[in-house]
Image (tube, helix red, strand yellow):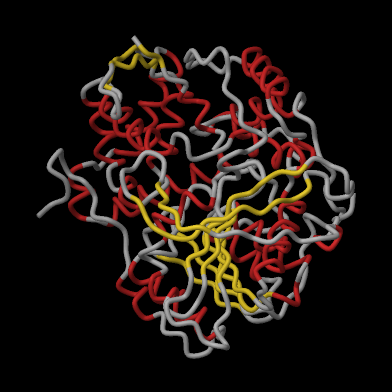
Amino acid sequence: MKRINVFALLMFVSALANAESVSELPDLELNKCVLDMPGTPTTAEAECGWLTVLENRQQPDSKKIRLRFVLARAVKPSADSTPIFFFAGGPGQASSELWVQLENPLKKLQRNHDIVLLDQRGTGAESPLSCTLDDESMDLRVDLEKTTRQVRECLQKIDGDPRFYTTTLAMADYEQLRIALGYNKINLIGTSYGTRAVQEYLRRYPDVVRSITLDSVAPVELILGSEHAMNLDLAMAGIFGDCRDDADCHEAFPDVEKQLQQLIQQARNNPQMITIDDPLSGDPVELEANMDVIGIALRMLAYSSSTQAQLPFLINDAVINNNPKRLLAQALMVMSSMQGMISHWMELAVICSEDYPLMQPRPEDADTIIGEAFYKMLVAQCEVWPRGEVPADFHQPFSSDVPALLLSGEFDPVTPPRYADQAAKQFSQHLNLVVKGQGHSVSFSKCTREIVTDFITTASLEELDTSCLEKQGRSPFFINLLGPTP
């Protein structure tokens, strides 16, 4: 019987050497390619190429690494249309793998704008930070000794130096690609961690940026991972508040908040062993429904509006039947769809260098849904993982007059709206929008994609029509196995 390491999925976050330090920019060869997205059968066509960069940009004789990039050319380019560079989340997501998901939402923009997606160093095909563990047996416990052992094992296997995979150095790769492609000005779109990358690129190369769109915003001051526990609890409180205000949900689940506490106490004091079917293979998966497993399951289901709508029903079902099998099965479906999408070792290269040195334990998190486990796991890994140099101003806010559109989901458990409020202070021209009833990553729903399209088309916030947001709301709550009330 297969066991699955659900907790591992919880880890899902010197001065700059400028691109000009590369004496010669190689010619870029582009070829037609068909791209897919891990875990899905869908494909999309584009042009693909490879950007060759120095791993250590301050050493001309440093080893070279290749980064895949995707170019979706404008259908009807014009002299004044500027390309769009997309920055993926994670940290650890390969941008090229997202083109399948982005092709349709960005279709209107592609009429007049080239769209470029570069795999950030440490992600994607041929990544020097790729690592397959010898011991990939699944263990649900927070086994810190095993975690440290696995990090040491990967450090012996990877072909790159993790010190050179920080955000700032990666932004020099983006700048090198911009120059090589011959673009003068570019528009930037970033989601989640990608909003940190966008802001860092803007800080280092302000004169080449025409507009920025930040979806699910991480302010530059944020220490990634430091507030995960608090943010999840706040998002859950908001979802439950919406349930109370919804007549059907409140009638069906009037005590859902108390039921959540019952579920948590059960997981902490007397966890059950349950068996569910793997949503991909169909194989039986044995899970101990301890607090680590319940916590990550709730966190995964809190990410999007569609799964948030299932939470009251699933929590009620787990308590009434004294068995969280259905809740964990649904969460496992979400997690299985995300497997293979994040480079954990690139994630460590970023977080251990940029965030961990500033992170402090938060004893007050002990009573939250996910508790202090995230911090303990970071300690176990980052005390071993090599750390790169980070510019002194990396976490310092800056000022910019580049037009900025900021988008947040009302119940985002990772990057809540208050983060966008904080980041917006940097921009003299900004519009900060909160999408009601939504979770993480909101820019490509039917309403928000039109707003993003209009904004990038004009690079102006004036007269931007956002009225469709008044009709935007959460997904209807599930009342039973059949779904929402008809």
Asked if residue 324 can be seen in this view, the reply is no
Residue 328 placement (x, y as % from top left): 33, 28
Point 76% across, 64% down: residue? 397
Q: Quadrant of residue 86?
A: bottom right
Position of residue 336 relative to residue 199, above or below, is above
In which quadrant will I find the C terminus?
Answer: bottom left
Residue 102 placement (x, y as % from top left): 42, 60
Answer with left or right where residue 340 lies relative to residue 277.
right
The single residue placed furthest to the left in the displayed view is: 486
Residue 137 placement (x, y as % from top left): 49, 12
Answer with left or right where residue 129 lies relative to residue 248.
right
Towards the viewer: 442 or 228: 442
Point 15% across, 38% down: residue? 481
Position of residue 335 relative to residue 18, above or below, is above
Point 44% across, 54% down: residue? 33
Position of residue 91 relative to residue 323, above or below, is below
Towards the viewer: 144 or 478: 144
Towards the viewer: 233 or 208: 208
Q: Quadrant of residue 298?
A: top left
Asked if residue 92 can be seen in this view, the reply is yes
In which quadrant will I find the N terminus?
Answer: top left
Q: Quadrant of residue 25?
A: bottom right
Point 57% across, 74% down: residue? 83
Towards the viewer: 120 or 393: 120
Number of labelled discs? 0
